[in-house]
Image (spheres, rainbow, N blue to C red):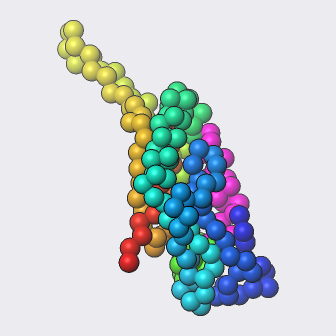
């Protein structure tokens, strides 16, 4: 993760531009089209980086990778999946300032709003860590020979398409819960003109 230099004010462009590629199956992958969208700091109008514009081929690659990962991921216990999320929760807390600084640069929010964006997203991560207790299910004997079972099973590969205006909070309304419940997720930024 790149942080803002301490001698740099929040409105200035970072010393180097960042390229954000796709992250598929544990690998950083440039888009098949080689097309990128500039990331503009709204407070300076300077380009601070570029983000991959994914093609249908990239989406198909991501979905295929998620389908491949699903059997092994969903076979982990919910407790084991929540343990990964607990580690992630700690990393977000440790790096909240850096994450907020990036939000300031990319979205033009003030630092207080950006820190709140990170904190609210991390609250959902914290909630997802409690899912081993919340999704246990139950078995009820509803009559002499009839038993009803309440289970929580993973669906498979799910997608989350999120807006840019709350870059940490909104994706984390879905991502941690989907992962801890055993699903694999394809996350896509909604780009509007």
Q: How far across and down, in percent of the image, does residue 147 sit?
A: 26, 16
- Please name whichever residue, 44 or 130, is drawn nearer the observer in this view of the structure: 44
**Image quadrant where residue 91 sits:** bottom right
Decide if residue 107 is on the left or right side of residue 12.
Answer: left
Q: Give the range drawn in magenta.
A: 83-101
Residue sitting at the far bottom: 44
Q: Quadrant of the C terminus?
A: bottom left
**Image quadrant where residue 25 sits:** top right
- Decide: is 135 above or below 55: above
Q: How far across and down, in percent of the image, does residue 10 sit?
A: 66, 85
Residue sitting at the far right: 7
- Please name whichever residue, 126 or 153, is drawn nearer the observer in this view of the structure: 153
Identified at 55% across, 77% down, the residue is: 38
Identified at 41% across, 50% down, the residue is: 159
Identified at 52% across, 41% down, the residue is: 65
Q: How far across and down, in percent of the image, does residue 156 sit?
A: 42, 36
Q: Main secondary structure of the magenta part?
A: helix
Please say whether residue 148 is one of the residues in the magenta stretch: no
Decide if residue 142 is on the left or right side of residue 112.
Answer: left
Q: How many labels does the image show?
A: 0
Residue sitting at the far top: 145
Q: In which quarter of the image is the N terminus?
A: bottom right
Q: How far across and down, in percent of the image, does residue 103 sit?
A: 58, 74
Question: Can residue 181 be seen by looking at this rendering?
Answer: no
Question: Can residue 33 be seen by looking at this rendering?
Answer: yes
Please say whether residue 97 is one of the residues in the magenta stretch: yes
- Decide: is 43 above or below 142: below
Identified at 41% across, 66% down, the residue is: 190
Decide if residue 90 is on the left or right side of residue 184.
Answer: right
């Amino acid at each position: 993760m790149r942080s803002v230099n301490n001698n740099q004010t929040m409105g200035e462009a970072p010393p180097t531009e960042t390229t954000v590629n796709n992250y598929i199956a544990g690998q950083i992958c440039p888009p098949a089209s080689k097309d990128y969208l500039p990331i503009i700091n709204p407070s300076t109008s300077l380009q601070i980086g570029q983000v991959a514009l994914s093609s249908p081929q990239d989406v198909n690659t991501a979905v295929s990778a998620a389908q491949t990962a699903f059997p092994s991921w969903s076979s982990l216990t919910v407790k084991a999946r929540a343990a990964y999320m607990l580690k992630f929760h700690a990393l977000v807390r440790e790096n909240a300032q850096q994450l907020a600084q990036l939000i300031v640069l990319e979205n033009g929010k003030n630092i207080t709003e950006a820190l709140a964006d990170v904190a609210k997203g991390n609250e959902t991560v914290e909630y997802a860590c409690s899912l081993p207790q919340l999704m246990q299910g139950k078995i009820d004997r509803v009559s002499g020979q009839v038993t009803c079972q309440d289970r929580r099973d993973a669906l498979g590969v799910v997608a989350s398409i999120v807006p840019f205006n709350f870059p940490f909070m909104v994706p984390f309304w879905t991502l941690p819960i989907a992962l801890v419940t055993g699903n694999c997720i394809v996350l896509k930024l909604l780009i509007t003109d």
